[in-house]
Image (spheres, rainbow, N blue to C red):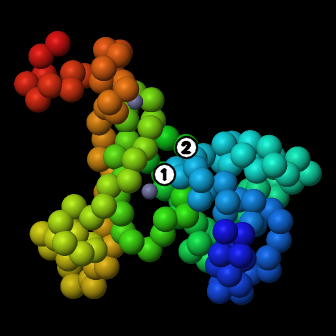
Amino acid sequence: MTAELEAQLRAVSLRVTRPRLAVLAALRDHPHVDTDRVIALVRADHPTVSHQAVYDVLRALTEVGLVRRIQPARATARYEVRVGDNHHHVVCRSCGAIADVDCAVGHAPCLTAADDHGFVVDEAEVVYWGTCPDCATDGTSPRSASPEGNE
Ligand SMILES: [Zn+2]
Ligand SMILES: [Zn+2]
């Protein structure tokens, strides 16, 4: 699996370094985590990797497209290695849990703009907001999950 990560770095002309491999491996195993969690995951295996190194690696990997940065409104930025497929996210308003949602219908951008103003649109960024199953069942969510809104 490490060989695969090394190949990904080489494909975008980035040097293979231990912090880069560690960040990619952490995100492969834990999608949609924020920077603090990435740091904790990386340092669990590689205690000598500094916070700043993780910040730098996340920025570099995002710039070359190996990592996707998602930032739901009012939430901290999350990172994932599932890139380039225009998938969307469903986010829990209560606990911030995030799950992947494949294209709603058809191929990217899978949403047809009412007026594209002549732009060639190839991507749509959508965040579905709601309540995750855990929060819906423990009754602490601010809104009922029932479509009628009953308590
Ligand atoms: Zn939740
Ligand atoms: Zn995702």
Quadrant where the N terminus sits is bottom right
Q: Quadrant of residue 6?
A: bottom right
Q: Which residue is mark 2?
A: 76
**Residue 83 point in image, percent of width and height:** 48, 69
Residue that extends furthest to the right in the rendered view of this protein? 48
Image height of 112 relative to 102, above or below: below
User: Which class describes the residues within 10 Å of circle 2: few (<14), some (14-19), or many (20+)?
Assistant: some
At a point 31% along the width and 79% down the height, the residue shown is 122
Q: Is residue 130 left or right of residue 17?
A: left
Q: Is residue 71 left or right of residue 89?
A: right
The quadrant where ligand 2 appears is: bottom left
Quadrant where the C terminus sits is top left
At a point 59% along the width and 72% down the height, the residue shown is 66
User: Which class describes the residues within 10 Å of circle 1: few (<14), some (14-19), or many (20+)?
Assistant: some
- The residue tagged with tag 2: helix, strand or loop? loop
**Residue 144 point in image, percent of width and height:** 21, 21
Q: Is residue 135 visible?
A: yes
Ligand 2 within 8 Å, label 2 CB: no
**Residue 136 point in image, percent of width and height:** 30, 24
N-terminal of the pair, mark 1 or mark 2, is 1
Q: Amino acid at mark 2?
A: Thr
Q: Report the disc number at residue 71.
A: 1
Q: Nearer the viewer, residue 113 or 117?
A: 113
Q: Quadrant of residue 61?
A: bottom right
Q: Is residue 150 left or right of residue 108?
A: left
Q: Is residue 78 visible?
A: no
- The residue tagged with tag 1: helix, strand or loop? loop
At a point 75% along the width and 60% down the height, the residue shown is 22
Image height of 55 relative to 123, above or below: above
Image height of 125 relative to 5, above or below: above
Q: Nearer the viewer, residue 7 or 60?
A: 7
| Disc 1 to disc 2: CB gap under 8 Å | yes
